[in-house]
Structure formats: structure tokens, C-alpha cells
Image (cartoon, helix red, strand yellow):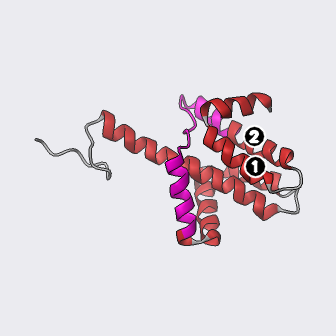
Amino acid sequence: MTEILDDLSAHNPHYLEMALRCAAGFSDPERIMTGFAIFYRILELDARDRSGAVPRITPDTRDIVSALIGEVGEERFILLATETLRSENPCLLQMAHSFSSRYKDYLAIMQGFLLLYKCLAAQAVTDRMLTLNGRDGFDDPRGLPAPDA
């Protein structure tokens, strides 16, 4: 656990901050934090197997996801985030469900997993857009080529 927390502190401090905030609201925050850390480690190992990395959540992405929750409502956000996780990584959804089902606060813990996943997914999209804009001559945020000057 210490290794994962040190890695998060060095490489993804906003994920760590969000996970700690989510875990703090429970009667056993250390156990809940362990679940969030394992969730991250699974994503990290999967990314490493594909020669990639887990996106580093930025404050801007965190704020965008927070605004989205305010815009669509918490219930709708949870539904959409669940569908995203189910379609992108059903095994990870099963891990989050199995972990959360051991607690009476199932829904709140699942919301933490879904929030963390949605922030990582949103950051991955942002990072891809930045890569396209910076490396491949794409200047338009929709991914369209820059007009010839």
C-alpha cells in the first residue's frame, strides 16, 4: 500500500487527493483507500502491459468533471459513469462492485470508484487531443487539420 501511495503522490497527486477525500467520509477510511489504491494499480498494470501509462489527472480535468456532475446531476452522472466503465473495462467494474458490496455504504463507495475512473477517462481524452494538437499538426480542438497558411 505504501508503494502505491508513494507512486500516486509522485505521479498522480490529484487522483490521490480525490481518493483520500472520498475515503475520508467513511468509518474505515484506510480500508476504502486500499480499494481505491488497488483500483489504480490494476489500471496502471493494464496500461503498462499495453506500453502506456495511466493519465495524470490535472486540476482542470477534475474541475470539468465536477462541473459535469453539477450540470447533469449526481444520479445521471453515476449512471453514465457506470455505463462508461461497463463498456470500457467490465472487469474493473466487477472489482469495484465486489469491493463495495462488502460495505453498508455500497453506493457511496461505488460513486468514489466511478468518479475516479471518469476523471482518468476524461484526462485520457484530453491527453489524446493535446497529443494530436501538438505532434500531428492538428490545431483544431475537434481534431481537424490546421488550415494551410
Residue at 32% x, 53% y: name it: 142
Q: Which disc number belongs to residue 110?
A: none
Q: Name the residue type under label 2.
A: Ile
Q: Which residue is tagged 2?
A: 38
Q: Secondary structure at mark 1?
A: helix
Q: Which residue is tagged 1?
A: 95
Does the rendering let one see residue 122? no
Depth check, front residue: 101 or 146? 146
Q: Which residues are magenta?
A: 42-70
Decide: is 24 above or below 15. below
Residue at 49% x, 49% y: name it: 60
Could you tell which of marks 2 and 1 lies nearer the N-terminus? 2
Callouts 2 and 1 close, C-beta under 8 Å: yes
Looking at the image, residue 125 sits to the left or right of residue 75; the answer is left
Q: Name the residue type under label 1.
A: Met
Q: Residue 32's spot in the image, x, y percent?
A: 82, 49
Front label number (2 vs 1): 2
| Residue at the far left in the pictured view | 149
Mark 1 residue crowding within 10 angstroms, few (<14) / some (14–19) / many (20+): some
Q: Residue 92's spot in the image, x, y percent?
A: 69, 48
Mark 2 residue crowding within 10 angstroms, few (<14) / some (14–19) / many (20+): some
Task: Specify whether residue 55 is painted magenta.
Answer: yes
Looking at the image, residue 6 sits to the left or right of residue 61; the answer is right
Depth check, front residue: 27 or 113? 27
